[in-house]
Amino acid sequence: MSRSEANGVALVARGLKKGFKVGRGRTEVLKDVDFDARHGDVTMVMGPSGSGKSTLVAALSGLLRPDAGEVVALEQNLWKQSDGRIDRFRLDHCGFIFQGFNLFSALTALEQVTTVLKYKGFGPGEARRKAEVALAEVGLEKRLNQRPSELSGGEKQRVAIARALAKDPRLLFADEPTSALDGENGQVVIRLLRRAATEHGAAVICVTHDPRLESWADRVIHIEDGRILDDVRRSPTGA
């Protein structure tokens, strides 16, 4: 990724609306939301439970179709694509880190990462090499052959981060990545997200209600009741 791209806009959303049927009524979760994110930035989307932040990230990443509005990601109008092309876009360009880790119980840490790389088209040897590099980057070079049941919560999240980073994603989405972790492991995770932006040039979009993460962000957006309340650019102070 070029230096100029690292400073450029990765994603722009305009007029996003999303509602869900609840009983006989309907709840509007996103209410005409505008959003953008830049390569090389960590953008924190913060708000209480039920504020719409996870729905926003799902709409931005091609996981949940909005009722109205558009998302232009890496210069592609995402929701005008077919479902198959959206799936391919996520595979080729996006990394995902979830609160629940989303690891396969039968696979080792190494296999968790190589499986995704093989789907992307890498041969077995190259997939293994890239997976080993990614796992070493998150400090798990000695845990390659452990399955999730043999790993701590913090180690599981680091496997999930390695799996995301191994694809060299240009967009990295994290949904409550520290909520299941203690303070020390939470710090490890946010440092890795910070590195993904600073060293890999990814546009990192992190949904959280964890105030520990705010100091690591280039930008903090607060959302409540489906609307953005404030949007502040800042200098990261985490260390």
Image: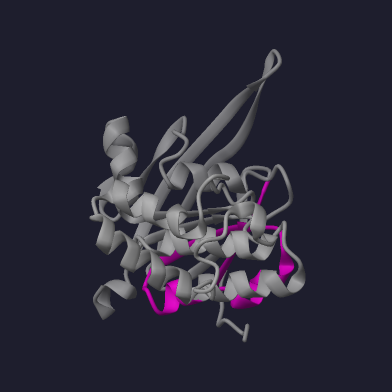
Q: Relative to residue 53, is residue 66 drawn left or right?
A: left
User: Compared with residue 166, is residue 17 higher up or lower down, i.e. above or below?
Assistant: above
- Of 40 and 162, the residue lying toward us: 162
Residue drawn 61% across and 53% down? 148
Residue at the extreme front of the image, as rendered: 145
Magenta residues (range): 195-224
Whole-percent x and y of residue 220? 59, 67
Quadrant location, the C terminus = bottom right
Residue at position x 42%, y 64% in the image: 165
Residue 44 placed where, x, y %?
A: 58, 64
Which of 202 and 72 lies nearest the eye of the viewer? Answer: 202
The structure residue drawn at horizontal position 44% and vertical position 33%, both measured from the top left corner, is 65
Q: How is this picture coloured?
A: one colour
Look at the image and tell me whether residue 41 can be seen. no
Residue situated furthest right in the rendering? 182
Q: Is residue 141 visible?
A: yes
Q: Is residue 210 magenta?
A: yes
User: Which picture quadrant has residue 52?
Assistant: top right
Is residue 185 on the magenta stretch?
no
